[in-house]
Image (cartoon, grey):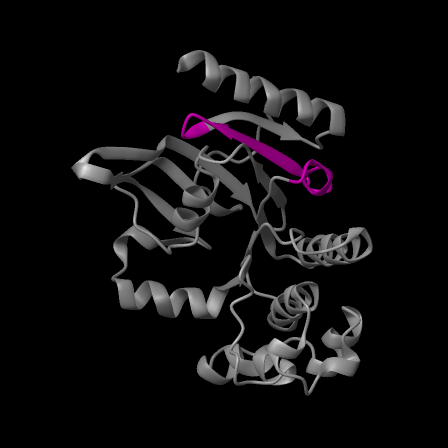
Amino acid sequence: MDSHRHNAPLGTIADAIVLSHVTKTFRGERGAEVTAIRDVSLAIPAGQFVAIVGESGSGKSTLMHCAAGLTTPTTGYVALAGTNLSALSSAKRSRFRSQHVGFIFQDYNLVSSLTVSQNIELPSRITPRLQLTADTATVLSSVGLAHRAQHLPHELSGGEQQRVAIARVLAAQPTVVFADEPTSALDLGNSELILGHLRQLASRGSTVVMVTHDIDAAIRADRAVVMAHAGTVDDIWRPGRDQLISRVMSAQQMRQSAR
């Protein structure tokens, strides 16, 4: 496996995210145990932009949820920004995320009764220690939505709602950003805009983890981690398009051969 090896060993202060031998199992239908990810170890340095790629069912979303502290691993541990999330209670993990983590979800996660501007300002209002690094007007202008500041989410297109979610993260500049298929609802031009902003977040020091099926989005990252069979099968530094397509297809073939 071609992989990018870090100068710092797993779990050092240089790593913003560390997963060590993480396994997550669920109870499926009729009580059967399903392993979503198995014995995954991964270290992501501060300021790196990483794409997690793989076919549906490969474990991408579960990996992101464990890394973000949204779900607790069955075994192994997760450290985020130097804090062992596995040692925190659910309430403490929630407070930690509100102070250090930004999310860009497929469903946008906007509050329907609040205007666009109010949605962007909401994290700083509910988390007193969180200070916005840019004013609302500036970030809305940067994503092409200055004219939508006083609109409600239902008055926006899906692509516009996604850009509001991006603007909310841009305003806070969190330590770590998790993006789940951030370009799925966007046309080519807006996809390029959003990917540019994710790159900008990383260049300013945020660590960005993007889960995506979009190869053209993934090659914009510093690094692509390919998943299959509930584990990581490739870790590629500065992935090229043809190279990444080949690795993803190989992973799919491995899965089909194993059936």
Q: In the figure, 253 relative to 83: above or below?
A: above
Asked whether 49 falls inside the magenta stretch, the response is no
Residue 13 seen in this snapshot? no
Q: In the figure, 144 relative to 25: above or below?
A: below
Residue 45 seen in this snapshot? yes
Which residue extends farthest top? 257
- Residue pictured at 47% horizontal, 17% vertical: 256
Q: Quadrant of the C terminus?
A: top left
Asked whether 230 falls inside the magenta stretch, the response is yes
159 and 229: which one is in front? 159
What range is drawn magenta here? 214-231
Which residue extends farthest right? 189
165 and 20: which one is in front? 165
Q: In the figure, 94 relative to 78: above or below?
A: below
- Residue pictured at 41% horizontal, 44% vertical: 62
- Residue pictured at 75% horizontal, 29% vertical: 241
